[in-house]
Image (cartoon, grey):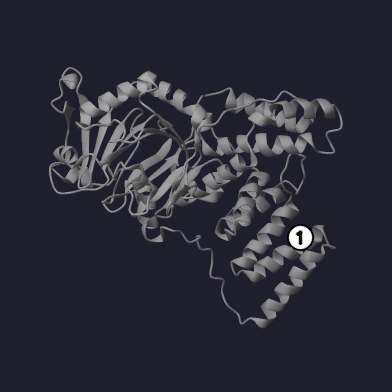
Amino acid sequence: MCLIVLFFLCVTTVCVCVCVFCQHSFHAKVSDLHTELYEGPGTAMANPLVAFTLIKRLQSEWLNVVYSNEAVENIQALRSSYEEEEAELPKLEDLQGAARGLMRLQDVYALQVGSLVRGRFQRVTNGQPIDIIMPAVSVLLSGDDCFLVGKVAYEQGDYYHSVQWLEESVRLFRGTGGGWSPENEGTLQDALDHLAFSHFKTGNVSYALSLSQELLHYDPMNGRVLQNVEKYEKLLVAASPSRSNGLRRPTSNHLRTRDTYERLCQTQGSQPMHFENPRLFCDYFTNDNPGLLLLPVRREVLSLQPYVVLYHDFITDSESEDIKGLAQPGLRRSVVAAGVKQEAADYRISKSAWLKSSSQSVVGKLDQRISMLTGLNVKHPYAEYLQVVNYGIGGHYEPHFDHATSPSSPVFKLKTGNRVATFMIYLSSVEAGGSTAFIYANFSAPVVEVNTTIIFTSITYVGEAVKMLKDQITATSAMGFFFFF
């Protein structure tokens, strides 16, 4: 059996411009960004930091400006224009999801928060900061940007991340004199307040006391903070001198495999096994099918146990765009099997839609091509309908089995049997990351190019790979199909 994980550093975002009057400073900031970023290279939205700040501006900053007391001039026109566009703008859950996506990228790729704040994607290797990607377009994060990310972590009880992001928020707010702008989500006092409690929760009581005392400098009559100061002082007097345990990452449902899949994602398919096994090869493949004789598929065998193969340029650009267009209206939050039901889960962050081959010609043609390539009957119920999956900022699927492992799984109610193989097509590339990691086989397959297909077996047996797939398919077996963009 093969355990897989998908992790994408990518973003799909729609920019909506709201033409309204606003305060000069905020208007100037937005105008500069549109000139420098959004009207420049089309790759701007591929940068998760740029995407996060855009979502924050559309969901939070515009909201704060529109309904602030300072927006007295043309207030009605401002609010009316905003409310006309509000339904199309990102929601609070989109903003929180983008913040969690940044933290997820931080963890999986071991990125330094201080570097992210400066618009760099760096991790420390052998004591030296290394850029894992150099975006064509970048953006600096503000103290308020960092505060929002830290606040999202704080509200989840995730003090490992809240400390790191709120430290940067406090530093940046201090650097600007703690000034306040109507579009901001928080202030220096807010950041100090959240940071102090975060340090208290991680065991760093002395620093929590110091931050709380600084906060009292700005708000000396804050009764709650005064109580916290008294509490921290008593704890320090009563406790024997000891060191803080330091920051620890939150526990995971997949703690045993977390280090492995993060290492595989970081190395992005550069494991040496591909070059050491003489049984792995590349060729032009027809599967002895007359339909492929004049147009063979470029095949790259990555692994035999489990059987994992890449097929390059399996579909055309126009087919890719057609599929994305068909799926876009039906995209919904992806769900996973949970006992006898299906529900959304934090370990699978994506949106998905299902396409039936009988209703759309491009899907029917694709089914036929897949059947020629694999020799399998891919019509329902012998295979699932085609699933199109969209991964946003830091979208991912943590370690999981691609086939059902519980007899009570909903998949068995469909009378189609368990998955024996999965056929995935990448509909877009990514700036960095995006690997499919096979945990127990200890290798990962990178997203090398758009329209590449990867096929892998979910339940493996000894035998020649292609013959194995043909022989195992029965009236009660199923094959899973996915598109990713």
Amino acid type at mark 1 = Leu
Q: How many residues crowd mark 1 within 10 Å: few (<14), some (14–19), many (20+)?
A: many
Q: In this view, does 33 lie above or below 211?
A: above
**Disc 1: which residue:** 215
Q: In this view, does 380 lie above or below 457?
A: above
In the rendered structure, the answer to whether residue 301 lies left or right of residue 96 reads left
Q: Is residue 161 visible?
A: yes
Q: Where is residue 275 in the image (x, y as percent from the top left)?
A: 19, 43
In the rendered structure, the answer to whether residue 196 lies left or right of residue 402 reads right
Work out whether residue 59 or residue 462 is closer to the camera in this orientation and state it: 462
Work out whether residue 381 or residue 252 is closer to the camera in this orientation and state it: 381
In the rendered structure, the answer to whether residue 136 lies left or right of residue 38 reads left
Work out whether residue 215 or residue 12 is closer to the camera in this orientation and state it: 12
Residue 479, by quadrant, is top left
Q: Position of residue 132 (x, y in %)?
A: 43, 42
Q: Is mark 1 on a helix, strand or loop?
A: helix
